[in-house]
Image: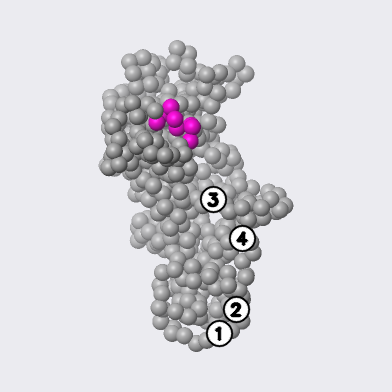
Amino acid sequence: MSIYQSIQDFISLALQNGTIEPLDELYHRNQLLHFLGLNDWAEVDKEAHEKDSLILMDQLLAIANENNVIEKGQDEFYEAALMNFITPRPSKINHDFWEKYKTSPDAATQYFYELAQQVNQVKTRDIARNIAFSHLTKYGKLEITINLSKPEKDPKAIAAAKLVKASSYPACQLCLENEGFYGIGNKPARSNHRIIQFSINGEDWGFQYSPYAYFNEHSILLNAKHQPMEINKRAFDNLLGFLDQFPDYMIGSNADLPIVGGSILTHDHYQAGRYEFPMAKAELREEIKLQQFPEVSCGIVNWPMSVLRLSSKNQVELSKAADELLKKWQVYSDESLQIKAKSADGKLHHTITPIARIREGKYELDLVLRDNNTSEIYPDGIFHPHPALHHIKKENIGLIEVMGLAILPARLKTELLEVEKYLLNQENEMSEIHRPWAEELKETEYFSKETVHETLQEAVGEVFEQVLKDAGVFKDNQEGQKGFYEFINFVNN
């Protein structure tokens, strides 16, 4: 296919998406020719030969590279700017989204999600590189992902980023100002990035799909203002308010304290999607009563972390109950279990990771109790993956992991292959960080070429299960569960 046919097919996508009108076609073509380093044209078929936007992207990037248009280390920025040629303006997308919303919320999100994939805002190719498997436990099936989707910066890009003058605009990667931002240095390319804007409880919010999604329709709800995350009644109201507008999605928030929170605490945001996580499938271990809230059902979830599940048709009472539990947790200590609400200087150590959904016509809130205390033995966190597990997972246990989906570092793809060789007594370059674990496995398991891969995946799953147990404040043992009931008594008194 000729380069001109590729360009024409790309323009056809812009027409199809409503990015341009027919009267804009010649103008759009000339802008695109200049962008690709071309100054000529040959007539081609108006009917598209290729309709796959990513294949056309590859073809046009090849043309740009041949014409030396792309500067060294600028591939990511140029690629996003290229896809911006077929991405409608924010006003057009917002208009179409809310028109489709009149039919149903599902019609609106389906439109936006499909468009985000087509224009490579959601990077489907990169996401497909992730390694995924599951691990069955007494709590249900945990999900494991080795995250390969975020490409590593090449040396040229790293060198180029160092030369760029530091900028405070946008303030962070979650600010609305990223929409259409070309990108510079270590600030990602967002030319083809689009955000749906709307109001929740009188505040302005933006809704976008995550470029490197970890689950189906992984989306981010971000505050229009650059302000820190905070778990409080307002947060519970926001999560439940989002469900009123998008009842087919779940939504949750990272905790708002270091160690137990996510990677971005400086910008208020939540994460949502059309997905049922392992924790959502977990049943109640026991139902309990909240004396002050007769309209709210409550129970302890059968989960390695400490989770209370609240349910009610009354959204107002549900939010009040969640707020009461949060306030009680923020002042509760049980030093026999190393649970301490405040430091001597008054610093708070307790918060909650909340998750909201609608199930069988009722609002449901899962409240995961978190504690970010440290000690001499556990300087990274008492309720954090302990050092023996750091060879697999040492990062914070955020919202997604809490719900039973492990996001493990890309290094494990090659490192685990070397562990397999070690277990088969083959020549290997196994990292020393895995040796104690691998030696223990070798003593307790039989490995063959046919079984080693699957057996090692099971072992990784067992590590993730222990990671969640480490992060749980009331351990799943007699002493821990006794402590859990004492906390519930404290709530009810």
Badge number at residue 38: 2
Residue lying at 48% horizontally and 13% vertically, measured from the top left: 335
Earlier-in-chain disc, 2 versus 3: 2
Earlier-in-chain disc, 2 versus 4: 2
Residue at the spot of label 4: 74
**In the displayed structure image, the side of residue 161 where residue 485 appears, left or right:** left
Residue 414 percent location from the top left of the image:
44, 44
Q: Name the amino acid, label 1.
A: Trp
Classed neighbour count for the residue bearing mark 2: other residues with Cα under 10 Å, few (<14), some (14–19), many (≥20): some
127 in relation to 353, above or below: below
Q: Which residues are magenta?
A: 431-438
> Is 421 one of the magenta-colored residues?
no
Q: CA distance from mark 3 to mark 4?
A: 14 Å
Residue lying at 50% horizontally and 50% vertically, measured from the top left: 150
Viewer can see residue 209: no
Nearer-the-camera pick, 460 or 34: 460
